[in-house]
Image: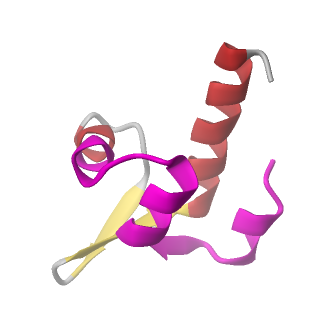
């Protein structure tokens, strides 16, 4: 599990896009498909860092890293 993401429990969409290396559109699709846990604060979406860690681990398993 990534140590850098464990320091905060939620990050912004901008930060999540950077960590996952995805576009706005792809991040929205992942959110709508239930692949990433999030909360909505006003007009902003905040993503749970544990969910991002899990997604990154899945990618490692698929890519064999």
Q: Name the chief secondary structure element in magenta.
A: helix
**Figure check: 18 above or below 35:** below
Q: Which of the 4 quarters of the picture holds residue 62?
A: top right
In this picture, residue 46 sits left or right of residue 57: left
For residue 36, above or below residue 18:
above
Residue at figure coordinates x 65%, y 77% from the top left: 8
Identify the image quadrant of the C terminus: top right
Q: Position of residue 27 (x, y in %)?
A: 32, 48
Give the side of residue 3 with respect to residue 24, left or right.
right
Residue lying furthest left: 43
**Residue 22 rendering spot, x and y as whole percentages:** 40, 46
Q: Residue at x 64, y 39 (%)?
A: 56
Rendered residue at 77%/15% (across/down): 64
The image quarter in which residue 46 lies: bottom left
Residue 41 appears left or right of 20: left
Q: Is residue 51 magenta?
A: no
Total tally of numbered discs in the picture: 0
Q: Which residues are magenta?
A: 1-28
């Amino acid at each position: 599990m990534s140590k850098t993401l464990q320091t905060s429990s939620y990050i912004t969409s901008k930060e999540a896009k950077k960590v996952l290396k995805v576009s706005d559109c792809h991040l929205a699709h992942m959110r709508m498909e239930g692949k990433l846990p999030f909360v909505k604060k006003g007009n902003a979406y905040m993503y749970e860092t544990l969910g991002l860690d899990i997604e990154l681990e899945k990618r490692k398993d698929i890519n064999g890293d």
